Image (cartoon, rainbow, N blue to C red):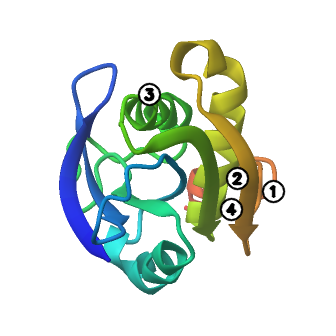
Amino acid sequence: GALTLHLVLTIDGVSLKTTHLHPARDDGLQHPCIILRTPYYRYFDFAIGVHLVHKGYHVLLQDVRGRFDSGGEFTLANFEKADSRCTFKWIGEQPWSNKTAGVVGLSMGGYTSWTAYASSLETFTEHGVHVKCVAPIISSCDIIKDGLYYDLSSERDQMQ
């Protein structure tokens, strides 16, 4: 396989650093894309990406907003749907894309998978990319409700 680096622009102009893993030779066909958006550094998922390329997929490894090589400020859960929407739009514009995708992620990356799927349903007419598979691993679909994001300020105030 091979890799190329890209900046996927968001609606508000933030650049999301994205590594595109793909077969070394262009076969002239269109392929599905697997997306791994993560706050843990995009190369954390590199081995998964290489395995998927050998199975015939194109793979995007992307640092979420405000993390590592992506621009903007990281704020948990605020931009995931909008930034996923821009990533789908980018995929839909690529000549190698057959406009089908899967989203995969571990922990917080699993949450980004759920939000990407929700975004794809809400914005399909804008980008035309159909998400056929969501594979969150050790994740929640609602990080606020399930307590993965918990504000300790009220307990701290009571302790003083």
Going from N to C along the chain, the mark reached first, 3 or 1, is 3
Horizontal side, residue 122 vs residue 128: left or right: right
- Dot 3 surroundings within 10 Å: few (below 14), some, or many (20 or more)? many
Q: Which residue is mark 3?
A: 89
Q: Which three-letter amino acid code belongs to the residue tagged 3?
A: Lys
Q: Position of residue 135 (x, y in %)?
A: 73, 64
Query: Tags 1 and 2 in contact by the CB under 8 Å rule?
Result: yes
Label 4 near label 2: C-beta < 8 Å? yes
Instruction: Name the secondary structure under disc 3.
Output: helix
Does residue 154 appear anywhere in the picture? no
- Secondary structure under tag 4 reads loop
Alpha-carbon span between mark 4 and mark 3: 29 Å
How far apart are the alpha carbons under marks 1 and 2? 5 Å
- Foreground: disc 4 or disc 3: 3
Please tell me which residue is depicted at 72% across the width and 27% down the height of the picture.
121
Residue that mark 4 sits on: 148
State the residue position of label 1: 146
> Residues under labels 3 and 2: Cα distance?
25 Å
Residue 111 seen in render: yes
Residue positioned most to the front: 28
Q: Which residue is mark 2?
A: 143
